[in-house]
Image: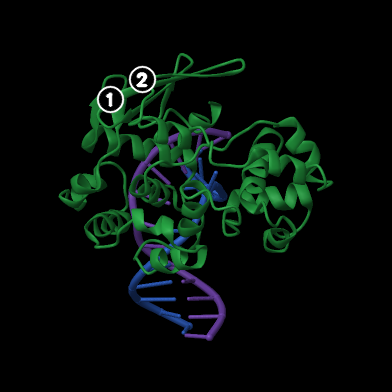
Chain colours: A green, B blue, C purple
Amino acid sequence: MGRFRVFGTDLANRYEDGVLHRAIAGRDVAIRARPGGVDVEPLDGETRGVVERLLGLPFDLDAFHAWAATEPVLAPIAADLRGYRPPLQPDPFEALVTSITAQQVSLYAAVAIRNRLVDRLGERVGGAWAFPSRERIASATEGDLVASGFTRRKAEYTIALARSSLDLDALATLSDDEVRLRLTALRGIGPWTAEWFLARHLARPHAWPAGDLALRKAAASIYGVDVHELGPRLHPFQNLSAHYLLVGWLAKP
DNA sequence: TACCAGGTAAAAA
DNA sequence: TTTTTACATGGT
């Protein structure tokens, strides 16, 4: 749950007083962690899929931990964090816009900017805010986004993405490389953004955001090697390894 | 007050 | 083809 607010409260995934609020299909869904499990209200066919992704259920943790125990450097970190499931971003459009806001700036700044966007263009649903829909952004002006703190450039990218004809849901059916190609063909989406989309939205096991500044530092600090050299060594669990390395590094830089 | 922060595209060299 | 620059906000 701490991952939902390490860099500040996220309006679209609002964690407060021990409860994570998320707007799903127009309803405020409350997710509460407790020893031994999670309470979700309401939990039904409409909310379950999103909740499962928010909680990182698609990851095969048992296989990861079995493998990590054999990786000398990662083993103690994985053991410390045993059971940690990286949250997935349930919505592809939201995932991409979120990444665009995080390009180049600190994640604290990114969260502040994203929250202003959600506040201005999203919809309040009880204790949660729905992230602005693709349609809402498509009909917005650059000025709307600039007023939230976007650079003029990022405002262009974001609106063009919303108005593009790319079927974001269909990306889930494509190979990692096909997804990289389709996404980086869009202006404003480079290798870093595409790789985090594979990692944090599609939960692809081999995703490895080597261009990420924090991951570079984590690789250097924990493994003492370059992030590009480390990637192949962590096959076939690059994605989960990246998340565990980042959390391990955040805890002890 | 500087300076840097989980990049990217476009301009300049 | 490779290197530099603009972008704009929030912490430290």
Q: Nearer the viewer, residue A185 or A103?
A: A185
- Disc 2 to disc 1, how far (Cα)? 9 Å
Secondary structure at badge 1 equals: strand
Farthest residue to the front: give it: A45
Residue that mark 1 sits on: A27
Q: Is residue A183 above or below residue A85?
A: below
Q: Is residue A44 above or below residue B6?
A: above
Secondary structure at badge 2 equals: loop
Q: What's under tag 2, amino acid-wise?
A: Pro
Residue located at (35% from left, 32% from top)? A12
Whether marks 2 and 1 lie on the same chain: yes
Q: What's under tag 1, amino acid-wise?
A: Arg
Q: Quadrant of the C terminus of chain A?
A: top right
Residue that mark 2 sits on: A42
Say left or right for A240 vs A121: right
Label 1: how many Cα within 10 Å (few below 14, some 14–19, many 20+): some
Chain bearing mark 1: A
Chain bearing mark 2: A
Residue located at (43% from left, 40% from top)? A109
- Residue A136 x, y percent position in the rendering: 19, 45
Label 2: how many Cα within 10 Å (few below 14, some 14–19, many 20+): some
Q: Is residue A1 above or below residue A146?
A: above
Residue located at (36% from left, 30% from top)? A47
Q: Nearer the viewer, residue A218 or A28?
A: A28
